[in-house]
Image: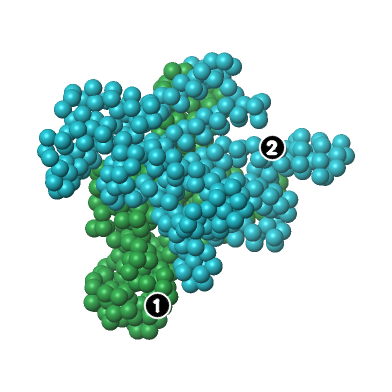
Chain colours: A cyan, B green
């Protein structure tokens, strides 16, 4: 058991290290490179050429004249202390921007994913119990129909209809302008009011397929011998549905839940752009457009870290939830 | 897809028995006939019997026709080709209206289709191909090979898809639709590879695999002949899912303006409608947003329906029964009808 945890931790660290190395490499592959762009910009601003090297160093965390391995060590070691360089576009440290934006994105995406799974589990279970009925057929069709719309397209429709046309919801920002005490009810209500459309667009477009998955799992579990035996034992229906069927049907969805959170964190790049919601996705897109590479890579690293942590947590907790899970290595076979 | 279908049935005991081990000489035409029966007629029949596959493939056919014949027959989109800002269903010149710069909306939709089809085909093939290769090898070999490949796919899985694609799109600036499809699925295969691996883990303990192994059949041959056919339904379902992902992601990337605009795409249309046509302010230009949206929705619908209906095609029992060859129809009928109920 111990070696299992050590292996998982090792894998998470290895992944992060590889992604850091990847970003280090990509920065050097980017068109024009970060330095050419920045240097041109500085010269245009009339900065004294002798100071340019120093400025570049603070922005990018790299000393262009050093050999590549020194640059690499610098890059990794400054990341370790949380220094992700400076954004050209916002003129602020990347870590400050990301630290400000990340909680909002996590709030929107985790809430959305939780809601959609809650809906999917109940909906899928009901479909499975009413299997073959009109209700089942109709709601299967509905869930397929909803999944044909990409979440950002639905988001555009929501913004246009409910935001601009009807004026019911704000079309930009995380909260209303003006400083507000973050520990008041008004603030929470205001934040929810801004977050409701992004959350809705994710929930509506993704709940359908998850509900179908839950339906499939439940139907499969309903056909299992132990459910039959439980019926023969005369256990009550509610006990069977909750303790026997629901538990076993929800189990396979757990990993799906965590991967979907990761997927949605990545999807925030499009979603937050549509809603002009300044979370990390919004800043990543802004950085892409402005060719603000330090910010772009910083956000990329943060999203990856979040995803690696989610997978790590899934691995660690899955064994606790389902004791049957195989934790050992597969044997060397053939 | 053709090739993979044939792979899956090639191991059908009946079929391989007749071709390889028979004492009677089989002529070429007979073989062709048999090939047609086994790979085209029967799967087609089963596919057609399922409502979802039927609707899905009909919609897909429309897209294929749009992307092949439609492109030749219908005019290419150009500015000022028709009157500006036409509403839909006004003239035959531009049945679905035109944009503010006089581009026919329908022409834009039709001429974006071939690239989209190419993109999803390339993306689907790449994603499923890599997943099958890595998943089967890892699951079957086990040990160090498994650990290395699993670590590799775990890492690929932990990198967020969309942001990675965006960064790569900026680095490589791809203009070839097939390349864009591959780029979009650059780490999509990882999750699929993981689940294929766990399926192979159970498959490799099956007696027929063990039999092949004791007979000294080489690993690649076992993988191709014994393992892969068994996971084929799953792979094809995921082919359709990967294709849907390619559609969604590519449209999203074009909408954001990250991919080069030299390729026509419905995402570009969405972007134009959203930004320029004033779909927001309510100048009666909603149709410019709705038309490409419908194009996206229907292709996604086709792919979901195909994915949902496809697994039946690869159930050999259903296939023989529908082709009228099954002897013990009685018992199976009830079995199948309940299964059919379950799936609709």
Q: Look at mark 2 in the image and give the residue it sits on.
A: A248
Foreground residue, B292 or B308?
A: B292
Secondary structure beneath dot 2 equals: helix
Q: Is residue B148 above or below residue B132?
A: above
Q: Which residue is at 31% across, 35% downward?
A: A85
How far across and down, in percent of the image, does residue A273 sit? 40, 55
Tell me the quadrant of the picture where the N terminus of chain A can be found.
top right
Tell which residue pokes out farthest to the right in this image.
Answer: A234
Q: Which callout, 2 or 1, points to the residue nearer the camera?
A: 1
Asked if badges 2 and 1 are on one and the same chain, I answer no
Foreground residue, B282 or B334?
A: B282
Q: Which residue is at 18% across, 23% downward?
A: A67
| Circles 2 and 1: CB atoms closer than 8 Å | no
Q: Which residue is at 12% across, 40% downward?
A: A48
Q: Is residue B154 visible?
A: yes
Secondary structure beneath dot 1 equals: loop
Chain bearing mark 1: B
Q: CA distance from mark 2 to mark 1?
A: 52 Å
Foreground residue, A20 or B249?
A: A20
Q: Residue A62, located in which quarter of the rendered image?
A: top left
How far across and down, in percent of the image, does residue A46 sit? 13, 46
Q: Look at mark 1 in the image and give the residue it sits on.
A: B283
Chain bearing mark 2: A
How far across and down, in percent of the image, does residue B283 sit? 40, 77
Q: Is residue A39 above or below residue A2?
A: below
Q: Which residue is at 70% across, 60% downward?
A: A135
């Amino acid at each position: 058991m111990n070696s299992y945890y050590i292996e998982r931790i090792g894998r998470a660290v290895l992944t992060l290290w590889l992604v850091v190395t990847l970003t280090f490499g990509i920065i050097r592959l980017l068109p024009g490179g970060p330095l050419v762009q920045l240097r041109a910009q500085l010269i245009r601003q009339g900065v004294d050429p002798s100071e340019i090297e120093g400025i570049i160093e603070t922005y990018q965390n790299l000393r262009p004249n050093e050999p590549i391995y020194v640059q690499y060590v610098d890059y990794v070691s400054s990341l370790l202390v949380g220094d992700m360089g400076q954004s050209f576009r916002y003129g602020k440290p990347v870590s400050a921007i990301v630290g400000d934006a990340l909680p909002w994105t996590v709030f929107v995406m985790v809430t959305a994913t939780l809601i959609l799974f809650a809906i999917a589990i109940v909906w899928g279970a009901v479909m499975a119990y009413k299997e073959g009925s009109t209700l089942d057929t109709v709601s299967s069709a509905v869930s397929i129909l909803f999944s044909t719309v990409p979440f950002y397209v639905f988001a555009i429709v929501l913004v246009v209809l409910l935001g601009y046309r009807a004026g019911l919801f704000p079309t930009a920002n995380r909260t209303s302008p003006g400083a507000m005490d973050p520990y008041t009810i008004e603030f929470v209500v205001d934040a929810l009011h801004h977050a409701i459309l992004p959350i809705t667009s994710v929930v509506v477009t993704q709940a359908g397929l998850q509900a179908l998955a839950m339906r499939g799992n439940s139907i499969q579990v309903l056909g299992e011998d132990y459910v039959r035996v439980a019926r023969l034992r005369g256990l009550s229906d509610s006990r069977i549905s909750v303790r026997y069927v629901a538990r076993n049907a929800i189990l396979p969805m757990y990993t799906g839940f965590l991967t979907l959170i990761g997927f949605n964190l990545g999807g925030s790049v499009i979603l937050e752009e549509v809603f002009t919601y300044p979370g990390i996705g919004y800043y990543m897109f802004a950085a892409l457009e402005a060719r603000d590479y330090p910010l772009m890579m910083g956000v990329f690293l943060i999203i990856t870290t979040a995803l690696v942590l989610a997978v790590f947590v899934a691995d660690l907790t899955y064994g606790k939830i389902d004791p049957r899970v195989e934790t050992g290595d597969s044997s060397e076979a053939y | 897809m053709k090739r993979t279908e044939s792979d899956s049935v090639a191991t059908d005991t009946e079929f391989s028995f007749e071709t390889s081990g028979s004492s009677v000489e089989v002529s070429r035409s007979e073989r062709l006939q048999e090939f047609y029966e086994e790979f085209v007629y029967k799967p087609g029949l089963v596919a057609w019997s399922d409502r979802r596959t039927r609707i899905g493939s009909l919609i897909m056919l429309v897209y294929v026709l749009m992307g092949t014949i439609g492109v030749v027959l219908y005019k290419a989109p150009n500015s000022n080709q028709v009157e500006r800002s036409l509403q839909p269903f006004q003239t035959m010149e531009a049945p679905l209206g035109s944009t503010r710069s006089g581009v026919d909306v329908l022409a834009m939709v039709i001429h974006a289709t071939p690239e989209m089809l190419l993109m999803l085909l390339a993306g689907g093939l790449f994603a499923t191909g890599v997943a099958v290769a890595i998943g089967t090898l890892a699951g079957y070999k086990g040990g160090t090979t498994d650990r290395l490949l699993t670590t590799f796919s775990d890492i690929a899985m932990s990198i967020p898809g969309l942001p990675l694609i965006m960064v790569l799109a900026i680095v490589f600036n791809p203009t070839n639709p097939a390349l864009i499809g591959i780029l979009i699925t650059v780490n999509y295969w990882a999750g699929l590879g993981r689940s294929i691996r766990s399926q192979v883990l159970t498959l490799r303990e099956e007696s027929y695999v063990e039999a092949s192994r004791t007979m000294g059949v080489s690993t690649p041959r076992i993988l191709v002949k014994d393992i892969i056919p068994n996971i084929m339904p799953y792979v094809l379902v995921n082919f359709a899912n990967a294709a849907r992902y390619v559609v969604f992601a590519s449209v999203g990337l074009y909408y954001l303006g990250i991919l080069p605009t030299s390729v026509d795409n419905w995402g570009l249309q969405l972007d134009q409608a959203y930004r320029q046509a004033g779909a927001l302010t309510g100048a009666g230009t909603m149709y410019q947003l709705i038309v490409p949206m419908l194009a996206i929705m229907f292709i996604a619908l086709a792919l979901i329906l195909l994915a949902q209906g496809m697994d039946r095609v690869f159930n050999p029992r259903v296939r023989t029964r529908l082709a009228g060859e099954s002897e013990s129809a009685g018992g199976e009928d009830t079995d199948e009808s309940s299964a059919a109920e379950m799936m609709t």
